Amino acid sequence: MKLTYLFIAIVMAVLASSCNRPEGTSEITTSDVTLMEQKSPTPVADAPFNHSNASDTTVYHAGQPAGNQDWDKKIIKTAHVRLELKDYNQFNTAIHNNIRRYGAYISQEQQNDNSYKIENILTIKVPVEHFETIMNTLGGDGIKVWERRINTEDVTGEIVDTKARIVAKQQVRDKYYDLLKQAKNMKEILEVQNEINELQESIESATGRVAFLGKQAAYSTIHLTYFQTLSEQLPQDEPNSFFSKLVQAFENGAAIVSGFVLLMITIWPIVLLLAVIFFWRRSFKRILLKRLN
C-alpha cells in the first residue's frame, strides 16, 4: 500500500475515535493532517482540580506540594527591596547567614564604598517556600525601607498547555514511526523522516521551555540593595593635580581648535571671496609684468 493511503487510513481512524469524545471537546478535521497543533486529551496524572473536593480545608503554603505536582501553582516571584541601615556590618552578617540558612544563594553581588556611604547590591535566588520568610527578615529596628516591591507571574497555564502539546506531538510522532516501517522507497522514507525530525525538534524545544519555567518558579528572585550613610555631606572633589590640569589644558586646546573650525565654516563665503580676489590680483600682476617686458 502506498504511503499516502496509509496516512489517510490513520487520519480516518483518528476521526473515528474522536466521535466518542464528550461534548465540548474539539474535533479533528481532515485539514489537520499534520496534527502539529492538536492537543491530546489531558492525561489522568494531570487531571485538573476536582470541584467535588472543594470541602477540603487543607491549606497549602507557597512551595508546598499540593496533591498532584503537575497541577501545583507555578508562580515566578521577583522582589525589589532598598534599605537604609544604621549598622551595615550587623545587617550584612545577618542577611548572609539567612541566605545560607534557608538554602538560598547569591547570583550577583556588588559592593560600593566611599567616604559618603557604604552600599551592597545583591541578587538572591530563594527557594519559593522560603521567599516570604526571608522577605519578613528585611526590616526591623534601625532599618528604613525605601522600596519594597513584589512582582508575580503565574505560568501554570503555560506549563500545562505546553505539556499537553508535547503529549499530542509525541503521539503523532509515534504514528509517523509506524508509517516509516511501512515505507516502500527512499522518497517515502525521507518524507516521513523529515516530519519526524520537525516533530522531535518541536518536542525538545517545548520540553526545555517547561523545564525553564519550572526552575524559575522553584526559585524566587530578590533584588536587594542596602546601604549606610557615613557622612551627611557629599564627597568633595580632590584638589587638581598636575595630571588633571594637563588633561584640562588639552580639552581647552581642543575646544579652541573646534571653535576656530566652526568659525571658518560659518564665514566660508567671505573666505572664498578673499581667496578669489587674492588669486586674481596675483594672476593680473603676472600678465602685466609680461607685457612690460
Image (tube, helix red, strand yellow):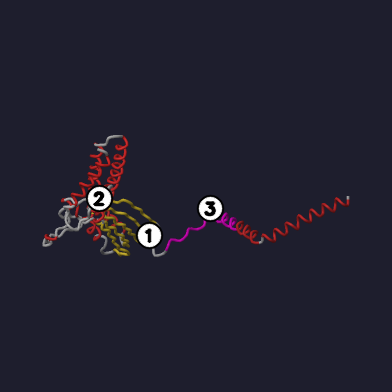
The residue that mark 3 highlights is 243
Which quadrant of the figure has residue 245? bottom right
The residue that mark 2 highlights is 165
Element at label 3 = helix
Element at label 1 = strand
Residue 83: image x %, image y %? 31, 62
Can you say whether 56 is above or below 218 in the image? below
Q: Which mark is residue 117?
A: 1
Q: Which segment did they paint magenta?
A: 234-255
**Is residue 146 in the magenta section?**
no
Residue 188: image x %, image y %? 30, 38
Residue 177: image x %, image y %? 24, 40
Q: How packed is label 2: few (under 14 Cα within 10 Å), some, or many (20 or more)?
A: many
Question: Alpha carbon of mark 1 to alpha carbon of mark 2: how far?
Answer: 53 Å
Q: How packed is label 3: few (under 14 Cα within 10 Å), some, or many (20 or more)?
A: few
Amino acid on which the number 2 mark rests in the picture: Arg
Residue 97 visible within the image: no
Q: Residue at x 67, y 59 (%)?
A: 268
Kindly report the secondary structure that dominates the magenta region of the rendered protein.
Answer: helix
Amino acid on which the number 3 mark rests in the picture: Phe
First in residue order: circle 1 vs circle 2? 1
